Amino acid sequence: KAELKTVSEGKLVMSTNAEFPPYEYHDADGIVGIDVDICTAIAEKLGLELEIEDIAFDAIIPEVVSGKADIGAAGMTVTEDRKKNVDFSDTYAKATQVIILKEDSTVTGPDDLKGKVIGVQQGTTGDIYVTDDFGEDSVERYAKGMEAVQALSQSKVDAVIIDGETAKQYLKQVEGLKILDESYTDEEYAIAVQKGNTAMVEAINGALAELKAEGKLDEIVAKYIKA
Ligand code: GLN
Protein backbone atom coordinates (compact mmCIF):
# COMPACT_ATOMS: atom_id res chain seq x y z
CA LYS A 1 0.00 0.00 0.00
CA ALA A 2 1.47 3.35 -1.06
CA GLU A 3 2.32 5.76 1.73
CA LEU A 4 -0.38 8.42 2.19
CA LYS A 5 1.04 11.92 1.84
CA THR A 6 0.01 14.29 4.64
CA VAL A 7 0.88 17.92 5.42
CA SER A 8 3.09 16.83 8.32
CA GLU A 9 4.86 13.47 8.16
CA GLY A 10 3.31 10.82 10.39
CA LYS A 11 0.42 13.09 11.28
CA LEU A 12 -3.14 13.67 10.19
CA VAL A 13 -3.85 17.35 10.77
CA MET A 14 -7.51 18.07 11.47
CA SER A 15 -8.95 21.57 11.49
CA THR A 16 -12.00 22.02 13.67
CA ASN A 17 -13.87 24.49 15.84
CA ALA A 18 -14.14 23.03 19.32
CA GLU A 19 -17.27 24.93 20.35
CA PHE A 20 -19.71 22.41 19.00
CA PRO A 21 -20.76 19.73 21.50
CA PRO A 22 -21.17 16.76 21.19
CA TYR A 23 -19.00 16.76 18.03
CA GLU A 24 -16.05 18.78 19.33
CA TYR A 25 -15.67 20.73 22.54
CA HIS A 26 -13.30 21.40 25.39
CA ASP A 27 -13.47 19.45 28.62
CA ALA A 28 -10.98 18.73 31.40
CA ASP A 29 -9.16 16.28 29.07
CA GLY A 30 -8.73 18.82 26.26
CA ILE A 31 -10.65 18.68 22.99
CA VAL A 32 -13.07 15.75 22.89
CA GLY A 33 -16.19 14.72 20.99
CA ILE A 34 -17.60 12.49 18.27
CA ASP A 35 -15.46 13.97 15.47
CA VAL A 36 -12.35 13.77 17.61
CA ASP A 37 -12.92 10.07 18.36
CA ILE A 38 -13.82 9.27 14.74
CA CYS A 39 -10.77 11.06 13.36
CA THR A 40 -8.51 9.54 16.01
CA ALA A 41 -9.74 6.11 14.92
CA ILE A 42 -9.28 6.99 11.23
CA ALA A 43 -5.74 8.26 11.88
CA GLU A 44 -4.95 5.06 13.79
CA LYS A 45 -6.10 2.94 10.87
CA LEU A 46 -3.87 4.98 8.56
CA GLY A 47 -0.88 4.64 10.88
CA LEU A 48 -0.92 8.36 11.65
CA GLU A 49 -1.18 10.49 14.75
CA LEU A 50 -4.10 12.91 14.91
CA GLU A 51 -3.20 16.57 15.44
CA ILE A 52 -6.05 19.01 16.10
CA GLU A 53 -6.09 22.66 15.10
CA ASP A 54 -8.85 24.57 16.85
CA ILE A 55 -9.80 27.57 14.70
CA ALA A 56 -12.89 29.61 13.73
CA PHE A 57 -15.52 27.57 11.89
CA ASP A 58 -15.34 29.69 8.76
CA ALA A 59 -11.53 29.31 8.65
CA ILE A 60 -11.69 25.50 8.38
CA ILE A 61 -12.39 25.21 4.64
CA PRO A 62 -9.71 27.84 3.79
CA GLU A 63 -7.14 25.79 5.78
CA VAL A 64 -8.07 22.64 3.89
CA VAL A 65 -7.98 24.52 0.58
CA SER A 66 -4.55 26.03 1.28
CA GLY A 67 -3.13 22.68 2.42
CA LYS A 68 -2.47 23.69 6.03
CA ALA A 69 -4.70 20.87 7.23
CA ASP A 70 -5.28 17.38 5.84
CA ILE A 71 -8.92 17.32 6.86
CA GLY A 72 -11.70 19.53 8.16
CA ALA A 73 -13.96 17.76 10.63
CA ALA A 74 -16.43 19.92 12.49
CA GLY A 75 -19.95 18.56 12.20
CA MET A 76 -19.61 20.02 8.74
CA THR A 77 -22.63 19.78 6.48
CA VAL A 78 -22.10 18.76 2.88
CA THR A 79 -23.39 21.54 0.60
CA GLU A 80 -23.11 22.09 -3.15
CA ASP A 81 -21.42 25.43 -2.51
CA ARG A 82 -18.73 23.94 -0.26
CA LYS A 83 -18.15 21.19 -2.83
CA LYS A 84 -16.86 23.88 -5.18
CA ASN A 85 -13.92 24.40 -2.79
CA VAL A 86 -13.32 21.03 -1.15
CA ASP A 87 -14.05 17.35 -1.65
CA PHE A 88 -16.03 15.46 0.97
CA SER A 89 -15.68 11.96 2.37
CA ASP A 90 -18.69 9.68 2.60
CA THR A 91 -21.17 11.06 5.11
CA TYR A 92 -20.92 9.75 8.68
CA ALA A 93 -23.93 11.35 10.41
CA LYS A 94 -27.39 12.64 9.70
CA ALA A 95 -28.15 16.05 11.14
CA THR A 96 -30.79 18.78 11.21
CA GLN A 97 -31.00 22.49 11.75
CA VAL A 98 -33.53 23.13 14.51
CA ILE A 99 -35.32 26.20 15.80
CA ILE A 100 -34.63 27.17 19.41
CA LEU A 101 -37.14 29.50 21.07
CA LYS A 102 -37.98 30.97 24.44
CA GLU A 103 -40.34 28.59 26.24
CA ASP A 104 -43.20 31.12 25.97
CA SER A 105 -42.69 31.86 22.26
CA THR A 106 -45.77 31.52 20.02
CA VAL A 107 -43.70 30.48 16.98
CA THR A 108 -44.82 27.00 15.87
CA GLY A 109 -42.79 26.48 12.68
CA PRO A 110 -40.40 28.02 10.15
CA ASP A 111 -43.22 30.08 8.53
CA ASP A 112 -43.73 32.02 11.76
CA LEU A 113 -40.15 33.26 11.66
CA LYS A 114 -40.90 35.89 9.00
CA GLY A 115 -40.06 39.36 10.34
CA LYS A 116 -38.29 37.92 13.38
CA VAL A 117 -34.62 38.26 14.27
CA ILE A 118 -32.81 34.94 14.12
CA GLY A 119 -29.48 34.24 15.78
CA VAL A 120 -27.02 31.95 14.00
CA GLN A 121 -23.40 30.90 14.14
CA GLN A 122 -21.41 32.77 11.52
CA GLY A 123 -20.67 30.84 8.34
CA THR A 124 -22.72 27.77 9.21
CA THR A 125 -25.53 26.28 7.16
CA GLY A 126 -27.92 27.88 9.67
CA ASP A 127 -26.48 31.28 8.69
CA ILE A 128 -26.56 30.50 4.97
CA TYR A 129 -30.13 29.17 4.84
CA VAL A 130 -31.62 31.78 7.20
CA THR A 131 -30.03 34.55 5.14
CA ASP A 132 -31.43 32.98 1.95
CA ASP A 133 -34.92 32.44 3.35
CA PHE A 134 -35.47 35.54 5.49
CA GLY A 135 -32.97 38.13 4.26
CA GLU A 136 -29.93 39.86 5.66
CA ASP A 137 -31.94 42.06 8.06
CA SER A 138 -33.32 39.00 9.85
CA VAL A 139 -29.95 37.50 10.74
CA GLU A 140 -27.86 38.16 13.82
CA ARG A 141 -24.49 36.41 13.51
CA TYR A 142 -22.41 35.19 16.43
CA ALA A 143 -18.89 33.76 16.49
CA LYS A 144 -20.05 30.88 18.69
CA GLY A 145 -23.35 29.03 18.73
CA MET A 146 -23.53 29.35 22.52
CA GLU A 147 -23.40 33.14 22.20
CA ALA A 148 -26.47 33.03 19.95
CA VAL A 149 -28.28 30.87 22.52
CA GLN A 150 -27.37 33.28 25.31
CA ALA A 151 -28.62 36.20 23.21
CA LEU A 152 -31.94 34.36 22.83
CA SER A 153 -32.16 33.77 26.55
CA GLN A 154 -31.64 37.54 27.04
CA SER A 155 -34.35 38.25 24.39
CA LYS A 156 -31.86 39.96 22.07
CA VAL A 157 -33.03 37.67 19.25
CA ASP A 158 -36.38 35.88 18.71
CA ALA A 159 -35.01 32.48 17.70
CA VAL A 160 -31.78 30.58 17.09
CA ILE A 161 -31.27 28.15 14.23
CA ILE A 162 -28.51 25.64 14.80
CA ASP A 163 -27.66 21.95 14.50
CA GLY A 164 -30.02 19.70 16.48
CA GLU A 165 -27.63 17.68 18.63
CA THR A 166 -25.66 20.80 19.52
CA ALA A 167 -28.89 22.61 20.40
CA LYS A 168 -29.73 19.84 22.87
CA GLN A 169 -26.32 20.19 24.52
CA TYR A 170 -26.58 23.99 24.77
CA LEU A 171 -30.05 23.74 26.33
CA LYS A 172 -28.64 21.66 29.17
CA GLN A 173 -26.70 24.79 30.12
CA VAL A 174 -29.30 27.52 29.54
CA GLU A 175 -32.77 27.53 31.10
CA GLY A 176 -36.12 28.72 29.76
CA LEU A 177 -35.64 27.61 26.15
CA LYS A 178 -37.26 24.95 23.94
CA ILE A 179 -36.54 23.24 20.63
CA LEU A 180 -39.32 22.97 18.03
CA ASP A 181 -40.15 19.40 16.97
CA GLU A 182 -40.35 20.44 13.31
CA SER A 183 -36.80 20.83 12.07
CA TYR A 184 -35.72 23.54 9.65
CA THR A 185 -33.50 21.42 7.37
CA ASP A 186 -32.13 17.89 7.06
CA GLU A 187 -28.39 17.65 6.48
CA GLU A 188 -25.47 15.24 6.50
CA TYR A 189 -21.99 15.59 7.95
CA ALA A 190 -18.78 14.59 6.20
CA ILE A 191 -15.05 15.22 6.38
CA ALA A 192 -13.62 17.90 4.08
CA VAL A 193 -10.45 17.19 2.08
CA GLN A 194 -8.42 19.28 -0.36
CA LYS A 195 -10.02 19.26 -3.80
CA GLY A 196 -8.58 16.57 -6.05
CA ASN A 197 -6.82 14.68 -3.25
CA THR A 198 -8.41 11.36 -4.16
CA ALA A 199 -5.82 9.37 -2.22
CA MET A 200 -6.90 11.11 0.98
CA VAL A 201 -10.63 10.78 0.28
CA GLU A 202 -10.22 7.07 -0.49
CA ALA A 203 -8.10 6.48 2.61
CA ILE A 204 -10.69 8.20 4.80
CA ASN A 205 -13.64 6.44 3.17
CA GLY A 206 -11.89 3.09 3.59
CA ALA A 207 -11.27 3.77 7.27
CA LEU A 208 -14.83 5.06 7.79
CA ALA A 209 -16.28 1.93 6.14
CA GLU A 210 -14.22 -0.26 8.46
CA LEU A 211 -15.30 1.72 11.52
CA LYS A 212 -18.94 1.35 10.44
CA ALA A 213 -18.58 -2.40 9.83
CA GLU A 214 -16.86 -2.90 13.18
CA GLY A 215 -19.66 -1.07 14.99
CA LYS A 216 -17.08 1.40 16.22
CA LEU A 217 -18.88 4.41 14.71
CA ASP A 218 -22.10 3.58 16.59
CA GLU A 219 -20.07 3.04 19.73
CA ILE A 220 -18.50 6.50 19.46
CA VAL A 221 -21.87 8.17 18.85
CA ALA A 222 -23.44 6.30 21.79
CA LYS A 223 -20.63 7.49 24.05
CA TYR A 224 -21.58 11.13 23.43
CA ILE A 225 -25.30 10.97 22.61
CA LYS A 226 -27.33 9.18 25.25
CA ALA A 227 -30.53 7.79 23.74
N1 GLN B 1 -23.40 21.81 10.39
C1 GLN B 1 -23.20 23.21 10.34
C2 GLN B 1 -22.39 23.58 9.13
O1 GLN B 1 -21.76 22.78 8.55
C3 GLN B 1 -22.54 23.76 11.61
C4 GLN B 1 -21.21 23.18 11.93
C5 GLN B 1 -20.52 23.85 13.11
O2 GLN B 1 -20.93 24.88 13.60
N2 GLN B 1 -19.44 23.28 13.56
O3 GLN B 1 -22.38 24.71 8.73
Image (cartoon, rainbow, N blue to C red):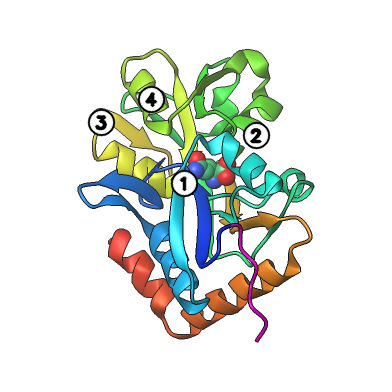
Please say if the residues under marks 4 and 2 sit with CB atoms less than 8 Å apart.
no
Residue 216 coordinates in the image, percent (x, y): 40, 77
Binning the other alpha carbons within 10 Å of mark 1 as few (below 14), some (14 to 19) or many (20 upward) gives some
Q: Position of residue 21 (x, y in %)?
A: 36, 47
Question: Which residue in the structure is indicated by mark 4?
Answer: 147
Residue 12 visible somewhere in the drawing: yes
- Residue 129, numbered circle: 2
Q: Residue at x 66, y 25 (%)?
A: 131
Q: Which mark is first along the chain, 3 or 4? A: 4
Amino acid type, mark 2? Tyr
Q: Residue at x 44, y 66 (%)?
A: 49
Quarter holding residue 137? top right
- In this view of the protein, which residue sits in the foreground, 179 or 32? 32
Cα gap from disc 1 to disc 2, whole angstroms? 27 Å
Q: Is residue 1 above or below residue 139?
A: below
The quadrant of the rendering that contains the N terminus is bottom right
Q: Report how far apart the C-alphas of labels 2 and 3 lie in the structure.
A: 25 Å
Q: Which residue is mark 1?
A: 53
Q: Residue at x 30, y 44 (%)?
A: 26
Residue 226 location, quadrant: bottom left
Q: Residue furthest left?
A: 28
- Which of pointers 1 and 3 lies earlier in the amino acid sequence? 1
How far separated are the C-alphas under marks 4 and 3? 11 Å
Q: Nearer the viewer, mark 1 or mark 2?
A: 1
Main SS, magenta residues: loop
- In this rendering, the answer to whether 171 lies above or below 89 is above
Residue 183 in view: no
